Amino acid sequence: MPGWHNATESLQEVGRVQMVGIIQEQHPDRARLFMQWKQMGWPILVDSYDLLEAPHVPISLAIDENGVIRNVLPAMRENGSVTEDFLEESFGSARDEPAAPTPRPDVAALYARARSEGSAQAWKAYGDAIAVWGGAGRVDQAIDAYKSVVSEQPEDGMAHFRLGVAYRMRYDSDGRRDGDFQKAVNEWSAALEIDPNQYIWRRRIQQYGPRLDKPYPFYDWVATAREDIQARGEEPAPLAVEPRGSEFASPEREFVASLDAPPEPDPLGRVLRDEDQFIEIEAVAVPAVVAPGDVTRLHFSFRPIQRTEAHWNNEAEEMVLWLDPPEGWEVETRMYSYPLPPEVVSLETRVIEAEIRAPQELGRGPITIPGYALYYVCEDVNGICMYRRQDLEVEVRPRR
Amino acid sequence: MNTSARHFAVTLLPLIAIAIPSEMRAQSSTPSHNFEVGTPFPTLSFPSLDDGRPASIADFRGQKVILHIFASW
């Protein structure tokens, strides 16, 4: 995309061609950072829910003055250039009637129609409208609408995909509920089962899945982009959700199970349990369904619970996670630690990711991977600080 | 719509395309998408990244547009 930008820069400057982008991404502000880095200032439209039904990216199109597609453009190298004939060859001369923009949908009318008709199609139209235009505050309604679609039409892969996008959006918001991330992954998996050719759907799972499944690292450019932008004396565009772990880990070509065996931190289970009192844990496997020998990526997120005014205490040792995989399952290492932030107390959501490989022989039932976390936490109601353990488990299902 | 026929089609097609291993391959293969040369680009509105206001490709009438459908991953 910077290729076409560079190649047509002089044409853009004199207004002979307009670059426009539509992004197919769960976290659209990452595209803003990318554009800032590459110094491309053209308009970007956000299509996280894939309303366009684009089966893959990138797609480059030459669209004429009347909104008609005149050419599918090939990829352009960053240092490529176009000749004078480019405009005539790619766009021709417009001769069709101009296309009028579709107005923003009437969400209330679509809701009324969905309520009265109750059809999958009506719920989908309402879901699309509320998902795209309702913002983070209306994601619950989008989820309900798409759930109505998939219960009516379980084979609608696009509805499963969009339901997954909405769950993941809620997971990233303050309105997050238990299990949102797992539900997002499950819906994306269901969508791919229905249509494995949808590259955009596949990418959402790959984004959070094992490194081996990635054709290339997804967000490794972010650190370099920030450095380059700061070196220019600019402030990098902020990101609502920092890419982490699986999202920017370089793909490794083999799964490396660690040979060293760290000592188990609490083998007798003597540390007092935090039973969802101070820290809430969400544990998700991506993908949640594995074949023999497959690698899956486990995401553990730890959030201080607001009700008890809990917060992290960072004055002692690092938080650790211990995994106790069942016989035959391999992990990179059994012990993971979370580096402490510099502040004495903090409230961040902590994420630890791990990869685990299934054995060659898998039974038929779900497999539970147990583990526990050890951390220092304080609560402000009584002003007490504690060292606590919380047991956790992730469920993985064998592919049938 | 005949959903069973549609399902049949989408479950057979993957056998051809599922082995595409990388972004590079996706770029160089013949694009298969809903955007046909000679047809109007969909006039759907989307929130704009800058301010969330509705924007559509139809807003750029009168201009030659190079449209990129992309992601930053």
Image: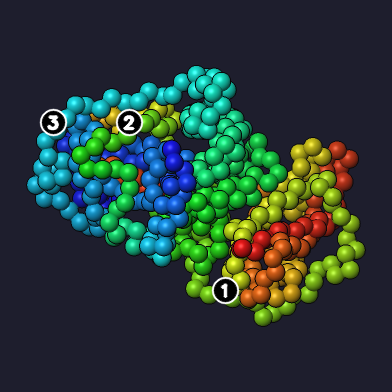
Q: Is residue A215 left or right of residue A372?
A: left
Considering the numbered disc 1 on the image, is that residue within a helix, a strand or a loop?
A: loop
Task: From the image, state whether disc 2 or disc 1 is nearer to you.
Answer: 2
Label 3 neighbour load within 10 Å: few <14, some 14-19, many 20+: few
Pointers 2 and 1 within a single chain: no
Q: Which residue is mark 3?
A: A95
Amino acid found under the numbered disc labelled 2: Thr
Asked which quadrant contains residue A138, the reply is top right
Q: Which residue is mark 1?
A: A255
Please provide percent x and percent y for residue A303: 71, 47
Measure how far apart labels 1 and 3 are at the Cα level: 57 Å
A283 w.r.t. A161: above or below = below
Residue positioned 41% across, 24% down in the render: A104
Please provide percent x and percent y for residue A75: 26, 55
Asked which quadrant contains residue A270, the reply is bottom right
Amino acid found under the numbered disc labelled 3: Arg
Please provide percent x and percent y for residue A135: 53, 31
Please provide percent x and percent y for residue B62: 19, 29
Residue positioned 76% across, 42% down in the render: A305
- For the residue pair A224 and A64, the one nearer the viewer reads as A64
**Can residue A270 be seen in this snapshot?**
yes
Residue positioned 59% across, 59% down in the render: A287
Q: Is residue A223 left or right of residue A7?
A: right
Pointers 2 and 3 within a single chain: no
